[in-house]
Image (cartoon, rainbow, N blue to C red):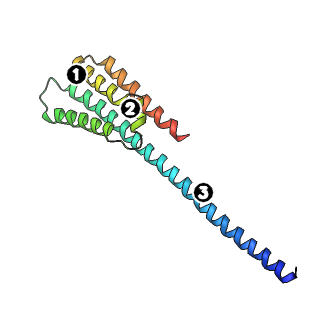
Amino acid sequence: MQQETVTLIVAGLGIGGTLAGIVVGHFLTRSWQREQWLLDCRKQEFKEVASAISHFSIEHLSYVTSQGTVLAQSKQAYVDSMKAVSCVLTDRIFIASDLDSARIPSRFLAIMEKFIDAGEKFDDPADQMSDLMKEVVELAKKDSK
């Protein structure tokens, strides 16, 4: 084989290897970016669930403590926060299976019923709501590792 032929073959392999490396790198980066995007979406949805449940707990406390007075805005805020949690628990896309497997929506509804029945003596449902919040946070942390 002549020297020029060997040089052309080596140069062709070098160029081909470089192009192949670029293509492989592109697909690896794209795959990683998609995975990161999914993790970010899941994190955002868990944050929205935790925020809605926390907001509901605060509104419930406010509503129960204002029962002696007639505050229509307190009752409306309480109802709105219940609706918000119900919506947030049912319209999650990326974490729906996690919420369902942990039975978060049904447990939240059961705790809500206990809150309604408890009136001003809401220590037990409040503790259950706190435990539910901790579980939501743990579910969110599980995916971020």
Task: Specify whether 33 is left or right of 90.
Answer: right
Which of the two marks, 3 or 1, is nearer to us in this view? 3
Residue nearer the viewer, 141 or 75: 141
* Residue labelled with disc 3: 28
Identity of the amino acid at label 1?
A: Ile
Q: What number of labels is visible?
A: 3
Q: Is residue 119 visible?
A: no
Which of the two marks, 1 or 2, is nearer to us in this view? 2
Residue nearer the viewer, 117 or 91: 91
Identity of the amino acid at label 2?
A: Asp
* Residue labelled with disc 1: 116
Q: Is residue 127 visible?
A: yes
Task: Specify whether 74 is left or right of 123.
Answer: left
Q: Vertical placement of 41 versus 27: above or below?
A: above
Q: Earlier in the sequence, mark 3 or mark 1?
A: 3
* Residue labelled with disc 2: 100
Q: Residue furthest front?
A: 1
Identity of the amino acid at label 3?
A: Leu
Locate the C terminus and report the quarter of the image it occupies: top right
Q: Vertical placement of 78 versus 117: above or below?
A: below
Q: Secondary structure at mark 3?
A: helix
Q: Earlier in the sequence, mark 1 or mark 2?
A: 2
Q: CA distance from mark 1 to mark 2?
A: 23 Å
Locate the N terminus and report the quarter of the image it occupies: bottom right
For label 2, count other residues whose C-alpha is less than 10 Å away and answer few (under 14), some (14-19) or many (20+).
few
Q: Position of residue 49 (x, y in %)?
A: 36, 38
Residue located at (69% from left, 69% from top): 18
